[in-house]
Image: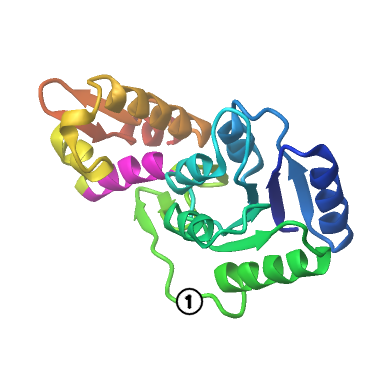
Amino acid sequence: MQRILIIEDDPKIAEHLQSYINKYGYEANVVIDFEHVMKDFQAFNPDLVLLDINLPSFDGYYWCRQIRKESICPVIFISARVGEMDQVMALENGGDDFITKPFHPEIVMAKIRSQLRRAYGEYAAHVEERVLETEGLKLYPERLELSFHEETVTLTKKESDIIESLIERYPRVAGREDLLEKLWDDQMYVDENTLNVNITRVRKKFEAVGIKGAVETVRGAGYRLNISWTKAEQQ
């Protein structure tokens, strides 16, 4: 069942959308905490997002940019704003479509089905999926998944990029500078601890699939993938 995340601060509109979407066989979830939208996004892992522009604290443009750091799922903006510039801003900030309020539910459903077909169905680009594999470890960059034997875990875009670099360099060391260049365009604006935080998250994802001590710190150089400990334990 495909999942739709609704980010709309009008509870009546959100409830109406959720009820209608569920009726058509999708699983719809409504964001309630607008201070931590990305927590709901990461937990629900939606196939598509319905996103209002006018939201508490941060607007929909901001949240769309945050979503795009982790996912390429379709984002449809829903807003009472009718100006052409608002629609341009929605598309330039990572949106895929725009619906103006008031709207007819059938229009919303038609656009949802259209975007899902384009992203995952009959209109999706049929290209061979990339799989990076070593020592039984498999990374699927397009679907942001890491698997090892029978265990699979979902990744963020940055986590996937780090693991991709580690696999590509395996068994060599992936340098800190190389990782920073892959993750961020301008290293001058990256906090010294940012990479360390992301490496910690990557280590937890490896542990989630049963690999302990997978990322070895090579002092003064960078990081190296190390799954020999796990292999020895299984023998």
Q: Magenta residues?
A: 157-168
Above/below status of 86 relative to 148: below
Q: Main secondary structure of the magenta part?
A: helix
Give the residue drawn at x 37%, y 32%: 232
Residue 78 visible from this viewpoint = yes
Tell me where residue 47 appears, x and y as whole percent: 63, 55
* Observer-nearest of 169 and 86: 86
The colour scheme used to paint the residues is rainbow
Residue 48 visible from this viewpoint = no
Give the residue drawn at x 76%, y 66%: 109
Seen in the image, is 230 located left or right of residue 67?
Answer: left
Indicate the quadrant containing the N terminus: top left, top right, bottom left or bottom right. Answer: bottom right
| Residue at image mark 1 | 125
Tell me where residue 69 appears, x and y as whole percent: 42, 44
Is 59 included in the stretch rendered in magenta? no
Give the crowd class for mark 1: few <14, some 14-19, many >=20 residues within 10 Å: few
Seen in the image, is 14 located left or right of residue 141?
Answer: right
Tell me where residue 45 appears, x and y as whole percent: 61, 45
Give the residue drawn at x 63%, y 36%: 55
* Observer-nearest of 176 and 75: 75
Q: Give the secondary structure at mark 1.
A: loop
Give the amino acid at mark 1.
Ala
Tell me where residue 29 appears, x and y as whole percent: 75, 43
